[in-house]
Amino acid sequence: MTDVNHTQALKLKIWTEERNYAVGESIILAMEVRNAGNRPIRLSEFFMAPADDPLKNNLEVHVTDDAGKHLSRVSGVLTGRLEFYPQIQSIDPGEAYRDSIQLAGTFVRKKGRKKVTQALWSLGENPELYMSEYPPMTPGDFQVQVIYRVNEKHLISLNEAERTEVWRGELVSNTIELSIT
């Protein structure tokens, strides 16, 4: 049986290929949860919904500018209760679960009847699909951190036997610095 409370055995790390980017350049954020323990651990894959309630996500992406202002989007998507069946990964000791998201880049969006190209912080979502307002990508220095959180609400679609096997808790990543010119 997997010990679902072995938070200290899990390490969350994030990184990008480079530290410096130009406005509009695609920034891919790589994420890794490593099992530093001695038992296999079952994890829910990273999940982000374009929802008005960020607590429905098990992954939070925090980007702050050099003035300490937190970049966020304004949702145009109202969702009710999220019906999501989580995908589960089993991570053996010394192994890792990796994934990546697009943190920023240039996107083509509809504005009325026109299509507009915009450099945006997408924060892991796809602005071409969702009607949210995303912050513009501007020059400056930024810090990025990720929080991965799984609780009972994220696992509600699993049956009781499956739920007891999946890790629950919170991991906070390292902070990385990005410079946009």
Image: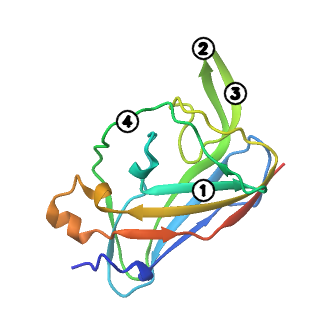
Mark 1, residue position = 62
Mark 4, residue position = 79
Q: What amino acid type is highlighted by mark number 4?
A: Thr
Q: Within 10 angstroms of label 3, few (less than 14), some, or many (20 or more) residues?
A: some
Q: Please give the name of the residue rendered at 45% of the width and 83% of the height, measured from the top-left corner.
A: 36
Residue 117's disc is 3
Q: Which is nearer the N-term, disc 2 or disc 1? A: 1
Q: Secondary structure at mark 3?
A: strand
Q: Please give the name of the residue rendered at 68% of the width and 60% of the height, measured from the top-left corner.
A: 17
For the residues bearing labels 1 and 3, Cβ distance under 8 angstroms: no
Single out the mark in the foreground, 2 or 1: 1
The answer to whether 177 is drawn above or below residue 132 in the figure is: below
Q: What amino acid type is highlighted by mark number 3?
A: Thr
Mark 2, residue position = 112
Residue 10's disc is none
Between 42 and 82, the residue placed more toward the observer is 82
